[in-house]
Amino acid sequence: MAINGFRELSPQEAASYVKNGDMIGFSGFTAAGTPKVVPRAIAQMAKELHLQGKPFTVDVISGASTGKSVDETLAQADAILHRYGYQSSSTLRNRINQEKVFFQDIHLSHVSKYIAMNRLRPVDTAIIEACDITPDGKVYLTTAIGISPILLEKASKIIIELNSFHSPRLREMIDVVVLHGTNSWPKGLDTPMSRVGKPYAQVDPSKVIGVVKNNEPDEVAEFSDSDETCVKIAQNVENFLLDEMIKGSIPKTFLPIQSGVGNIGNAVMKQLGESKEIPPFYMYTEVLQDSLIPIMHCGKLLGASTCALTVTTKSLNEVYSNMDYFAKRIVLRPQEVSNNIIASSQLGVISINTALEADIYGNVNSTHVTGTKLMNGIGGSADFSRGAYISIFICPSTAKGGKISSIVPMCPHIDSSEHSVQIIITEKGIADLRGKAPSEKAQLLINNCAHPMYKEYLFNYIKSSKPGHIRHNLDKCFELHSNLLNFGTMLPE
């Protein structure tokens, strides 16, 4: 049977085209727009081959993290050897930290560039979720654009997972332009809502092996309710932005906002959406989360440029039921455009991203616990913070019931340096690091952002350090982290 001139395949037939050692590219960005049935069939095939004593692993590249059916399922089947880009799977994380999977953490704005400019090995097969494919190779993607356009262009073989769950009207949101790794900025993209591309990605029809039918929603998990700490961080972000408006640093019409993924980011955007003092605003971001749908529906969020609709099925159904309203207020772009550093600069973006920890001089660690154990990856945080008009990093002052301080003498791993970090906010307060020397930054961060139980230690650390432009005691700079590894808490009794 054929679909628009392409052979219809079962998931198992599609999986049989994937060979041991292949490089596979997957569509999607987060769980939005990722394939489901074909990667599960690949994982099952891997398990069966392993039982027969035969080797089977593949290299995986995707726009960002994926749905459970890709990273988690393939990792459980021991089917991944190399992973490129970003991930958030617990099983894959463990495999990476056990050095059973080789992971390269990449700025998300660079992933398409790496593929386009052949900086990685060639992609053998791309598995792309779509709403439709036409006989001449127009591919209408679903809830995320990610790196799908460059995968469709560069991969040797293409499998389309045709998902009828999604609204065919998603094409009204999609704006595809491929930069090919050399053009730094698409002409005409002068506002968050500017449309400069096409509503589809293009593929050479001769490369399409076949089409697999599917009717499953995205595997987007619900965020937990905001706790008191998240709410206080969100209030501090709101207060900071309002103060910037009063000073005239932010115009009364406001500026586009970028917000990272997660519970705290969700809480911040909910707070800004409900604020009576914050004016209606636009977003130029990488992910649209659940909290943004109601504030868009009520008119507070005027419009959003994003790479992915990372919303739960309930929220997505709300969008699909009101496409006349939402289709003209959401633009879905490839990640080399949504995360483009020039966008943050030209559009005056206010970036708000989450840190694991920050040191007393404003360096931020977003990725590695105690400097060695990967959490997820750098994602798009540095894409935005490096060019942002105002770059904000947020985190709770402590974790694990106070056993971990998020403000430390020195980060054992740095993702965003002091040169890109302007503002750090915890539930305890705000540290505006702009125009401050290192010693002034340290005083601000300890006084305003550190938890009281760690302030004395941090001040004593500075006193114990030899004078210099940046004071450090190299014998004690990682003492808190060593304590955590040895005793399970940074401040043992």
Image (tube, rainbow, N blue to C red):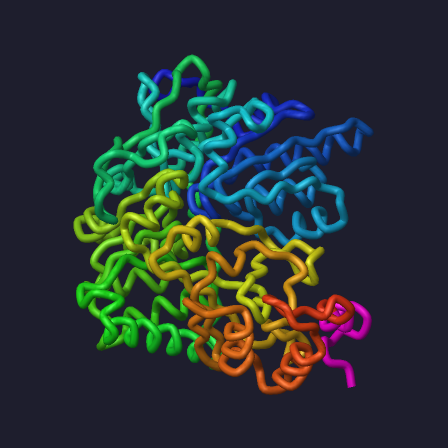
Q: Quadrant of the N terminus?
A: top left
Q: Position of residue 384 (x, y in %)?
A: 41, 52
Write the residue at 50% across / 30% down.
127
Indicate the quadrant where residue 199 lies.
Answer: top left
Note whether residue 407 is visible: yes
Q: Nearer the viewer, residue 51 or 373?
A: 373
Q: Is residue 363 above or below residue 489?
A: above
Q: Quadrant of the C terminus?
A: bottom right
Write the residue at 37% across / 78% down.
235
Q: Position of residue 287 (x, y in %)?
A: 39, 52
Q: Is residue 235 above or below residue 94?
A: below
Q: Is residue 421 left or right of residue 293?
A: right
Q: Position of residue 404 (x, y in %)?
A: 66, 74
Indicate the quadrant where residue 198 lies.
Answer: top left
Q: Is residue 437 above or below residue 9?
A: below
Is 32 inside the magenta-drawn segment? no
Write the residue at 53% across / 63% down.
355
Q: Nearer the viewer, residue 88 or 99?
A: 99
Q: Nearer the viewer, residue 225 or 422?
A: 422
Which region shows up in magenta?
Answer: 479-493
Indicate the quadrant where residue 129 lies.
Answer: top left
Q: Is residue 37 above or below residue 16?
A: below
